[in-house]
Amino acid sequence: MKIVLLGCFALSPKGTVAQRALPLGRALVRRGHAVTLLVPPYDNPSEAGQAWEDAGVRIETLASGWGLAGWTTALVRRTLALRPDVVHAFKPIGPSGAAALLLAQRLPLVIDLDDWEGWGGFASSGAYAPPLAALIELQERLTPKVARRLTVASRALQRRSIRRGTAPAAVHYLPNCVDRAALESAPPSTEEMLAFRAAVDAGDEPIVLYVGYVPPANDLDLAVAALAPLAESGEVFRWVLVGDGPGLDTLRGTLPAALTERTRFLGRLSRLALRAAFAASRLLLVPARDTRINRAKCAMKVVDALAAGLPVVAPAVGQHREYIVHEVTGLLTPVGDRRALTAEIRRLLNDPALAARLGAAAADRMRRGYSWDHWAGEAERAYRAAVNGIPFR
């Protein structure tokens, strides 16, 4: 098949295009398909106007100077010029969502949902002005209705799509997975791990790792509440936060003194450097409340950490229950139970053999069950169903 993937924004700094659309495209190429990924880099204009090939996927970063309408027009025109058999639009909002609405009458269309975007989700997070939040809600409600098939990154999105009227057979569960390049690459060297430990002054102390963008409203207060008793009781560890975002300034100002001494902020790391961070750490801590955003999201940091052999400690929210098998590949805690989160972190800090066993099982499970080469078959089934009986016009 000739497939066009519509990206929702630039390849960086956000992750959906680089970590979901592109690795899926690589796997589809390995299955014999011709794949073009069109990227509207409105959030990173430095990427605009380029074209190259990545593992058989042709990537084109489009150029436009006319806002949403311009990016939408560029996506539609280039897609029609390519005359694909099927179009897979990533996110129902923004330029990709608008282009999908226009393309739906011309081409078989599949829409990918990887977050709860509208009211109750990111549109209600306070990160968007009210008019933009209203547009996001409208797009998320309307765009999936014109698609022949949906792909969803989480079970919560699968259930929500069915509740909103999509036939169950038309909703294809397509979780975030591990790219073949990560599976086949050599593990970080001892020197790389030691360099990371030196950068955070860890010495021989076990590292509790956090990875991710930190918005103004976040769940890191749950991590502070779980870690502070450990610091105050004299537990030896280093809490390392990898990422950036406006919420970090607030976090710095609210850390208890004992935890401040044990905390290091590293900013964003390359994916290569992040692999060294995973290898050098004892556990990944993923604090999370039971919100619609957390139920629906499919965090790549969890996928990457487990695939790298790093056990994850997290509340049992959403996709955490899909990826983490309690006491086998990580440790799950009841939602809202701070003492349980503290206790499970303490277990791994004091039992490196348990952490190693969980990590090894996690890496094996992710390699066997969550590779893009395996799950690309589900995307392929969605495409064939969308194309069936719908001639190119």
Image (cartoon, grey):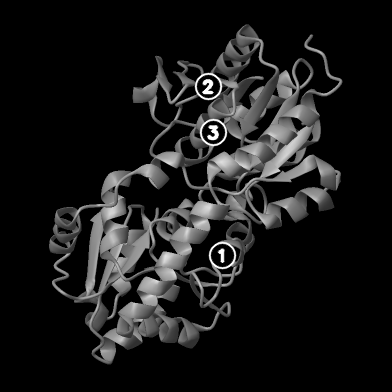
Res 298 seen here? no
Please tell me which of labels 1 and 2 falls first in the chain. Answer: 2
Q: Residue 141: x, y in percent? A: 75, 41
Q: Could you tell me how far apart the alpha carbons at marks 3 and 1 are, in whole angstroms? A: 24 Å
Q: Earlier in the sequence, mark 2 or mark 3?
A: 3
Residue beneath disc 3: 27
Crowd around label 1: few <14 · some 14–19 · many ≥20 (10 Å): many
Front-most of residues 116 and 368: 368
Q: Which mark is residue 320?
A: 1
Image-based side of 213 in relation to 5, left or right? left
Give the foreground label among 2 and 3: 3
- In the picture, the quarter occupied by the N terminus is top right
Judge by depth and name the residue closer to the eye, 182 or 161: 182
Q: Residue 81: which disc?
A: none
Secondary element at tag 1:
helix
Three-letter code, disc 2:
Leu
The amino acid marked with disc number 3 is: Ala
Residue at mark 2? 38
The quarter in which the C terminus is drawn is top right
Question: First in sequence: mark 3 or mark 1?
Answer: 3
